[in-house]
């Protein structure tokens, strides 16, 4: 059998499927990069993804002072200080599916949040799976929150005006940190969850039109298995391992959740928002039409993504309120 024609036909078929997927995306959010298999679903693609993340260190906004500090446990944090801090603070946790990413990738986001909202932003480095499975990343991020509370005098922060947020896997880690903070009496005023990776059981659900771009079902299977082990979806998990599984959401702080309607995490994120509301939490849910996972990074200059990011920035300002008089 000649394999050449078979390969050509298969490639054409895959290309047609990809074309239909991209046509569902608004023109302003389309990118040549969407034609590439940008996903992480195995050791080789993980190595490539980590290499790519290591090349990215985004620009720091003007007039923002950035320093690095050591945190108990060995990891470090970046601290972004605006020219005129108002006493509020945000602990930010980067994304990457729990298996890749680093805080330097979010220099631009964190420094602009600091400058535009007048808050101190602390961005933490945490250990990555599969080399360091749960609870390593969770413990690192919670240690960063504890460090932030211990450092309020040094940083000029009101301990009652501290928020926790993150993107993708970082959003999931943020949700788990906030749950633990509630349980242990560590004050958190607000949580900011940008298309958070909340529920490992998404890996067992039927596949749909969502999640075909950037973070795919295959990537999700790989990421959760790296973090929790291969049998995670069919077993009971420790607290905070998959925040979307938590049944009692009473008492959690006001929340902003943003997600696109083409994102793999759409159902788990909107479901979490609804359950938070039912438990009495004030929730601002932003659903962006035609947005795929991490489009605000890939097409950050597009009008819709500027507006999406601005809604997130404004939510932080509202959530942390005004300085104490």
Image (cartoon, grey):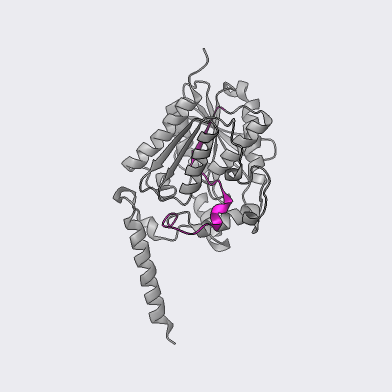
Asked if residue 48 shows in the view, the reply is no
Q: Residue at x 53, y 49 (%)?
A: 96
In the rendered image, the quadrant that contains the N terminus is bottom left
Give the residue furthest to the front: 278
Near-viewer residue (42 or 109): 42
Q: Position of residue 203 (x, y in %)?
A: 55, 56
Give the residue furthest to the left: 27
Q: Position of residue 312 (x, y in %)?
A: 43, 34
Q: Is residue 196 magenta?
A: yes
Quarter of the image where one finds residue 75: top right
Using the image, determine if residue 234 lies above or below residue 69.
below
Q: Is residue 125 magenta?
A: no
Using the image, determine if residue 44 lies above or below residue 123.
below
Q: Residue at x 61, y 49 (%)?
A: 128
Residues shaded magenta: 189-212
Q: Is residue 186 left or right of residue 105?
A: right
Q: Is residue 305 left or right of residue 228?
A: left
Give the residue furthest to the bottom: 1
């Amino acid at each position: 059998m000649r394999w050449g024609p078979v390969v050509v036909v298969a490639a054409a078929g895959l290309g047609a499927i990809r074309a239909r997927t991209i046509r569902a995306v608004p023109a302003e959010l389309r990118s040549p990069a969407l034609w590439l298999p940008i996903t992480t679903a195995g050791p080789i693609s993980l190595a490539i993804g980590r290499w790519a993340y290591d090349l990215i260190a985004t620009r720091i906004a003007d007039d923002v002072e950035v320093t690095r500090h050591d945190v108990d446990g060995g990891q470090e944090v970046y601290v972004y200080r605006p020219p005129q801090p108002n006493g509020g603070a945000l602990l930010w946790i980067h994304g990457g599916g729990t298996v890749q990413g680093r805080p330097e990738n979010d220099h631009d986001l964190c420094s602009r949040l600091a400058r535009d909202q007048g808050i101190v932003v602390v961005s933490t480095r945490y250990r990555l799976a599969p080399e360091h499975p749960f609870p390593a990343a969770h413990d690192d991020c919670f240690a960063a929150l504890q460090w932030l509370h211990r450092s309020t005098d040094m940083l000029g922060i009101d301990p009652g005006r501290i928020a926790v947020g993150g993107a993708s896997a970082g959003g999931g880690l943020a949700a788990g940190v906030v749950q633990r903070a509630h349980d242990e009496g560590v004050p958190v005023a607000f949580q900011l969850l940008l298309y958070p990776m909340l529920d490992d059981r998404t890996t067992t659900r039927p596949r749909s039109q969502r999640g075909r771009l950037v973070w795919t079902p295959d990537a999700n299977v790989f990421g959760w298995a790296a973090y929790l082990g291969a049998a995670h979806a069919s077993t009971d998990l420790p607290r905070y391992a998959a925040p979307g599984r938590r049944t009692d959401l009473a008492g959690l702080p006001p929340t902003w959740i943003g997600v696109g309607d083409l994102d793999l995490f759409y159902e788990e994120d909107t479901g979490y928002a609804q359950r938070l509301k039912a438990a009495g939490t004030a929730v601002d849910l932003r659903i962006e039409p035609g947005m795929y996972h991490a489009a605000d990074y890939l097409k950050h200059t597009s009008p819709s993504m500027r507006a999406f990011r601005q809604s997130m920035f404004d939510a932080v300002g509202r959530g942390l309120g005004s300085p104490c008089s």
